[in-house]
Amino acid sequence: MIELLDVSKADNIYSSLIRHTISGEKLNLRFGIEKSDYARLKRILEFRPFENTGFAPYRYFFALSYRPDSENDRISIISVRVEQLDRNKQFEFELSKKYISNILWFNEITNKKEIEQLIEI
């Protein structure tokens, strides 16, 4: 599964950082996103559904299942697997169809040469 690591804003440029495994190699990939998805992704990264278990980090994975939003044709609802220690559960979040299509495209890639310019070391 593709893991959401971070979102950032610098000089009014918004980007998302994900981790994806291609041919057994874990790659951190940064790509540009829409301003509206910045807030939506921040909401995901700040979501803490489990009881306080100290300082154990949360992890967020795109489950790749999604459905259209009945009220907005530019938005879809995607399932995100939230993990902390031995706990995990899937929750639904709103994201743009454009962002979801990017995640689905990354999931199809089998050769890192296709996305070399997005790799962050």
Image (cartoon, rainbow, N blue to C red):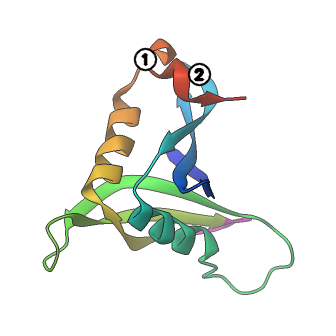
Give the magenta range. 84-90
> Where does residue 101 sit, x and y in percent of width and height?
29, 45
**Residue 18 at x, y = what percent?**
56, 44
Name the residue carrying label 2. 24
Q: Residue furthest front?
A: 11
Q: Residue at x 39, y 56 (%)?
A: 34
Q: On the rendered structure, is 67 left or right of 35?
A: left
- Residue 70 percent across, percent down from the top left: 13, 77
Question: Nearest the camera: 7 or 104?
Answer: 7
Q: Position of residue 27 (x, y in %)?
A: 62, 30
For the point 49% across and 63% down, which residue is it?
38
Does the image show residue 54? yes
Residue 2 shown in magenta: no
- 26 to the left or right of 91: right
What amino acid type is highlighted by mark number 1?
Answer: Glu
Asked if residue 25 is positioned above or below residue 80 in the image, the reply reads above
Magenta span: helix, strand or loop, mainly? strand
Name the residue tied to disc 1.
114
Which SS class for mark 1? Answer: helix
Spatial distance from mark 1 to mark 2, Cα to Cα? 16 Å
Lateral position of residue 104 relative to residue 2, left or right: left
Disc 2 residue type (three-letter): Gly
Q: Nearer the viewer, mark 1 or mark 2?
A: 1
Q: Is residue 53 left or right of residue 40?
A: right
Q: Nearer the viewer, residue 14 or 55?
A: 14
Q: Is residue 87 magenta?
A: yes
51 shown above or below 121: below
Mark 2 falls on what kind of element? loop
Tell me where residue 93 sits by quadrant: bottom left
